[in-house]
Amino acid sequence: MFTNKRVVRQALKYSVLPLSLLAAGGFVWQASYAAFSATTSNATNQWKAGTVVLADDDAGVARFTALNIVPAQTDTKCIKVTSTANVAGNVKLYLASKTATASLDTYLKFTVQQGTGGDFSTCTGFTADLTGGTIINNQTLAAAALANTSYATAAGSWVTTGVGTETKTYKIQWTFDTTGLSQLQIDALQAATAGITFTWENQNT
């Protein structure tokens, strides 16, 4: 009987190993298979800054070169501004780099209108915008330059869409106005000079 019990204990002892191996094998089998999964992606995201492009048709020539002007003389000319920006914006006009001698800038009156039609060569066909068409109204060059010194205080408002080529024509009239001056004061303006730079700026909105 002693021998039989020993054999049984040995049999039980060795029978544990296959069971352990089977259990371990079961874990390996379960770990070798991945769970169900699915993904979705939104790839190749990119960013590129827009452009604000503005040009005029002056071909590098000053809009006015008025020499030997006399009291009451006047002139009207146009200039066309073109936007090829790809973002929406707002174009305004300001006056920069004013120069003057003998206070001639206080006797030059300016009116500026914005609209459609006409260009650097002619104002024929020009039509002022129905709303906001006159952006500088009979102001002296001195006053206009003082009031419109930068984009923040600039005259006019041309809203651009940023789609394709867009244009706006500006009609500029000046008059040498000596109304109310004495003859002596008028004579003092002989050979006086004045100058200004018309600057259009487009800022995106």
Image (cartoon, rainbow, N blue to C red):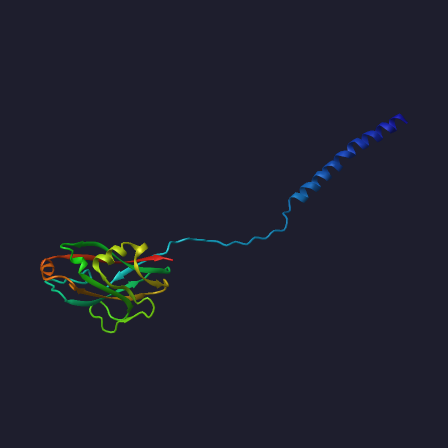
Residue 25 against residue 162 in the figure, above or below: above
Q: Residue furthest bottom?
A: 125
Residue closer to the observer: 166 or 8: 166
Residue closer to the observer: 77 or 100: 100
Q: Does residue 184 appear left or right of residue 174 in this picture?
A: left
Q: Residue furthest right?
A: 1
Residue 42 against residue 129 in the figure, above or below: above
Q: Quadrant of the C terminus?
A: bottom left
Question: Could you tell me which residue is drawn at 13 percent across and 57 percent down?
Answer: 193
Residue 64 screen position, x and y as percent: 17, 63
Question: Could you tell me which residue is drawn at 64 percent across and 44 percent down?
Answer: 32
Task: Tell me if I can see residue 14 in this picture.
Answer: yes
Q: Quadrant of residue 162?
A: bottom left
Question: Could you tell me which residue is drawn at 21 percent across and 57 percent down?
Answer: 142
Q: Quadrant of residue 22?
A: top right
Q: Quadrant of the N terminus?
A: top right
Q: Does residue 176 appear left or right of residue 168 in this picture?
A: left
Residue 109 screen position, x and y as percent: 20, 63
Question: Could you tell me which residue is drawn at 48 percent across and 53 percent down?
Answer: 43
Q: Quadrant of residue 89?
A: bottom left
